[in-house]
Image (cartoon, rainbow, N blue to C red):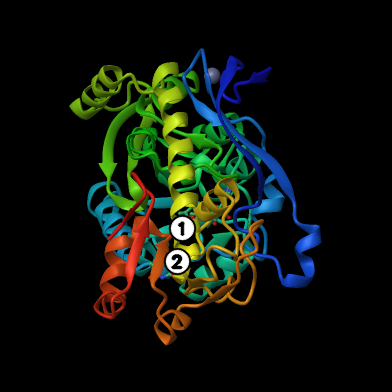
Amino acid sequence: MTECRICGGVVEEFLDLGRQPLSDAFPRPADVDAEFFYRLAVGRCVACTMVQLIEEVPRERMFHHDYPYYSSGSSVMREHFTRTALGFVETELGAADPFFVEIGCNDGVLLRTIAESGIRHLGFEPSTGVAEVARERGVRVRTDFFEESTAVAVREAEGPADVIFSANTICHIPYLDSLLRGVDALLSPGGVFVFEDPYLGDIVEKTSFDQIYDEHFYLFSVRSVQTMAERFGFELVDVERLPVHGGEVRYSLARAGARQPTPSVAQMLAQENAQGLAEPEVLQGFASSVSRIRDDLAGLLRSLRENGKTVVGYGATAKSATVTNFCGIGPDLVSYVCDSTPAKQHRLSPGAHIPVRPSEAFAASYPDYALLFAWNHAGEIMAKEEQFREAGGQWILYVPEVRVV
Ligand code: DWN
Ligand code: SAH
Ligand code: ZN
């Protein structure tokens, strides 16, 4: 029996995605024998409804000097975080000498704007390679995991934070008890803790099962986040849906009673109840849709191969590790994957061992079909690669269903 990492309740498994590698570990051909695998399965706590992984991968295996995801690689995400930072400067950072803390600042995609605004700030970023890039951009970084002890150390040395922000990181942290005690220690009495992560409602609605991988330990809903917040003395005071990364929610937590909740919290809770989100039947239905997508996608790729068509992947995403390893997609079905990240190029994709080539390889020899693993950046990528379609190429998408466009 698995115990909930938040409340100790029973976690009921509803989907098994099998033996999986680390999603962001791209081995050299010589290193494939040393790959780490774990069982990727996901369940829901019967007590607090939190959806979470059954097995936890030790954090040092995932987040280290060679962590290869650089947040600034997408222009849409750069704009999103610039806008977000400027929003905080206008609304929350007006007092004298404000202090802004980010958990998981990566290459400084958001904090660079805070730094340029002359605001006292600190980013927590344990992956030292991406942290160095943030520093080059004028960002102050502490290369530690955020948890109770490191948060207390910052509070003692630098005083309370007015804003603690985090994007695509809180769902990566199994030890949310320690994290929330750390937020409690560091946040000023009237401050706000804001985080945005992939939304369970979007994942179920779109069957975006590739949002499930080692780093995404939790799939949050408004209900599960509200329950968790209350458990640690906080109150969920605002929620906002975001279009980025295939659908996210931005949650704002304040100390209980410190701020008036906006109507959007009750609205989204009512919507989740109406759709039965996190009800066992709905999650079972999601699991069935995942099997259908696997069969459809593997079937399409096999028939293209039989018909002599060429297929390459676009975007060596962490998400794609789940897709390739769960659906049995190797270099026999997808010849190689193009990606703009130097740290991933000339390596192999995790587990499936599809070669990763630079983006330039794409236009150098267009395939008949491109499987868009970075489907969350479809607008940006399809615009950039317009000539592919003009040359007769077609994109394959698998969210919310397998289709060719
Ligand atoms: O939560 C997480 C999100 C924020 O980022 C992390 N756990 C890991 C990572 O997940 P991902 O790898 O699935 O994220 P993306 O943003 O979907 O990755 C896009 C990939 O595609 C990157 O490797 C960069 C590449 N890319 C490209 O080659 N050309 C991206 C764009 C926009 C492009 O034009
Ligand atoms: N905020 C960025 C990065 C997301 S990737 C964005 O939205 O694009 C997740 C990042 O969280 C990684 O850079 C990883 O090193 C970092 N991380 C993981 N656990 C962490 C923790 N406990 N404290 C701070 N950062 C953490
Ligand atoms: Zn629970």
128 vs 117, nearest the viewer: 128
The verdict on label 1 being within 8 Å of ligand 1 is no
Farthest-out residue, bottom: 364
Left or right of 250 on screen, residue 34: right
Name the residue type under label 1.
Answer: Ser
- Callout 2: SS: loop
- Residue 142: x and y in percent read 59, 58
Q: Which residue is identified by label 2?
A: 307
- Residue 364: x and y in percent read 43, 87
- CA gap, disc 1 and disc 2: 6 Å
Can residue 167 be seen in this snapshot? no
Residue at left offset 48%, top offset 44%:
294
Which quadrant of the view contains residue 177? top right
- Residue 54: x and y in percent read 63, 30
Can residue 159 be seen in this snapshot? yes
Q: Are marks 1 and 2 in contact (CB under 8 Å)?
A: yes
Name the residue type under label 2.
Answer: Asn
Q: Which residue is identified by label 1?
A: 303
Q: Ligand 1, what quadrant?
A: bottom left
- Residue 398: x and y in percent read 39, 50
65 vs 285, nearest the viewer: 285
Residue at left offset 35%, top offset 69%:
116
Which quadrant of the view contains residue 3? top right
- Callout 1: SS: helix
